[in-house]
Amino acid sequence: MALVVQKFGGTSVGDIDRIKNVANKVKKEVEAGNKVAVVVSAMSGVTNQLVKYCNDITEDFDKREYDAVVSTGEQVTSGLLAIALQNIGVKARSYSGWQVGVKTDTAYGKARIEGIDADTLLKSMEDGVVAVVTGFQGISDEGRVTTLGRGGSDTSAVALAAALNADRCDIYTDVDGVYTTDPRIVKKAKKIDRISYEEMLEMASLGSKVLQTRSVEMAMKYGVCVRVLSSFLEDPGMGTIVCEEDEIVEKEIISGITYSRDEAKITLLEVADKPGVSATIFSFLADANINVDMIVQNISEDGKTTDLTFTVPKLELANAVDIIKSHKDVINYRDVMSAANVVKVSIVGVGMRSHVGVASTMFKSLAEKGINIQVISTSEIKVSVLIDDEYTELALRALHTAFGLDKEEE
Amino acid sequence: MALVVQKFGGTSVGDIDRIKNVANKVKKEVEAGNKVAVVVSAMSGVTNQLVKYCNDITEDFDKREYDAVVSTGEQVTSGLLAIALQNIGVKARSYSGWQVGVKTDTAYGKARIEGIDADTLLKSMEDGVVAVVTGFQGISDEGRVTTLGRGGSDTSAVALAAALNADRCDIYTDVDGVYTTDPRIVKKAKKIDRISYEEMLEMASLGSKVLQTRSVEMAMKYGVCVRVLSSFLEDPGMGTIVCEEDEIVEKEIISGITYSRDEAKITLLEVADKPGVSATIFSFLADANINVDMIVQNISEDGKTTDLTFTVPKLELANAVDIIKSHKDVINYRDVMSAANVVKVSIVGVGMRSHVGVASTMFKSLAEKGINIQVISTSEIKVSVLIDDEYTELALRALHTAFGLDKEEE
């Protein structure tokens, strides 16, 4: 008998038929003799509607009230799934975050889980009652409902799995696992059987939207074995297991290739080449809550000035340029240029640590296709390049082949 | 400085513009120097959708889960109204029933309020913060969310007014007060300035849908002065005040005339005329949760059998007839007849207590119009008759004139 946490996202519970389908999947786990806790998202579209209501009043809303509003979607789903389970003979009851002590900090709208009182849920499962818990939310020590930010239900599920010391945390979603790259673009993309937390973290933060970054961080911290699988397949198979690196036997050098179209590029020409300048620029942006990702600084030719290029979220581009222009006197540069038609393509793999020449293979593959690299950034297990977004598909396919990830022909 | 509870129903908060309109009405009370608590319903249509979700899974759902689902509509409205208030400079925060200790029994789906911890709300109002409380719901001592049944937000408002010892409880709705009869049918219907709890109770239970019956009972029990007024008028005037009888100076003999199309008639022919027979029949119906309202038993002509006529809710008619037929052997009657094309018309007024001839005036007015009375029932302050529903409008207008309720021509 295992203790299993199952999580179902918004599209998996998108209507009543799908909720009934989810109930059948839960029933299978129960009939296999397992103790089951389920975490649910809001029905797809519901949270967006609630967010829109808030924005229609004002965009400068009290985040505590926003949380009171948007947290209701999951409460609806949890009650409906409990009804659907009971209807097919499975004992079940719904729990809101506040009812099972999902304690968070007070960062309303993007709260972090600080702990979960597992006792209530363990007692419920001990009695053979499936616990259906609202994802995405908790309660602050002020006694108010908090939400974890978009995608937070994955995090709820992993936190619950950690608190319950679950054997498995199965994240059911609309894809059947994590792929070596986007299968809509690269037909030869393969499903990955096992991937390490570190790789998954890079994949998640680089644009692969299967798991929310924070949920992977939490899984890594608490050693929760997470499985990603499809809620739409009758037999979802094994999906993709996210686990410790040393639990993976067959390691590839590169596990996956990701891309993100969410970034835009800003270049400052002839900035003074002296200490503190970058700090000045980036502190203005930080004050405006704009996240800077890739940064490169050219070698100074004249020893006095240099060009500085960096990326910001595409949605913040206009805002960032405005801020830089309004501080031109302080920053001191000749001109600012920006471009939104860029894509960040990244290769990710723990194999990089022990293999040399990975980056050069990447650069060579792109050069062979005539793709110009605008910015490069690297970490221990990934290499990212910024390129013209017209080349996205071409770059993904070339790299997928170059790193030997192509699926064998059937 | 007064302490005021304001309640806004589903149509009053039906969309974002209406919620903003409600915020302005609350602001007026605040600017008048009053301490304000607001009770809100779900946006119109929302609760129906949530109920439909439950019914789409099964009609035999767990009422505790149903409550978890349908209670979310008010949570959305309370958060949105708090945002709308803050947006126009009024300090406000939302509270769910469980956050302010609206304690109920465990009759999920139709729970009764047992008490409210007023401290949190009084503290909030003391700090100049408008408390926006979810109507229609509370928390049981099992720690689960309960709902009060449809229309329960009125009851929430009155209970809150009682707990806070409020000076006024203003129920904002889509009409500007309680009328002598339905103004859509009788053009000369007048708005009633003041009406006693007893009369309002009869009016509510007899089909006038302005206030929920239980809210009036509670107002009477705790002596809460309730005011009904329109949320759609810029200046809603005084509306109708529901209060103690002795606070009403100008008393009419008849305060109002109501009608209900929700009942149907069943007649059992040649039932044995002996003790215990009625008890048998009505206990079968009670077991099936079917409410019997008007009952008449003819005088027995042969001393052995009699005819028994009574009314049941129209929705339960087929069910009630089935039950009676399936127990024909036990009940022992010759035949059963039923009719759904009936309407119950009632005259209500505390003046009846001290005036004779009220009932005969009623019967005479109807007879003059050729309207046949099928069943009669009376209480201390009302006379109800069951008539063919084709005569509804004619009967209302005739009685309205007969009892001197017609509005003077302007």
Image (cartoon, coloured by chain):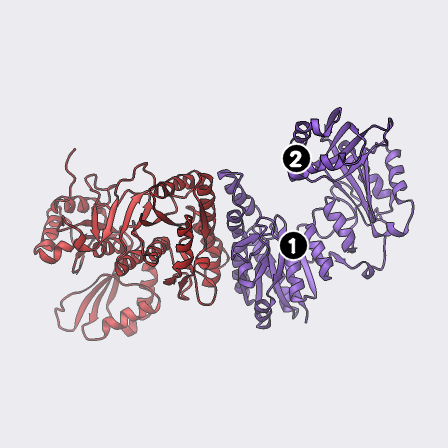
Chain colours: A red, B purple
User: Which of these two is toward me, A40 or B37?
Assistant: A40
Mark 2 and mark 1: Cα distance apart in space: 26 Å
Mark 1 lies on a secondary structure that is helix
Residue A19, quarter of the rendered image: top left
Q: Is residue B267 left or right of residue A104?
A: right
The mark found on residue B309 in the picture is: none
Q: Mark 1 points at which residue?
A: B154
Name the chain under label 2.
Answer: B
User: Which of these two is toward me, A185 or A12?
Assistant: A12
Mark 2 lies on a secondary structure that is helix
Is residue B169 shown above or below B57?
below
- Residue mark closest to the camera, 2 vs 1: 2
Residue furthest to the left in view is: A356
Residue at the (24%, 56%) spot, across then down: A201
| Quarter containing the N terminus of chain B | bottom right
Residue A379 seen anywhere in this rendered image of the structure = yes
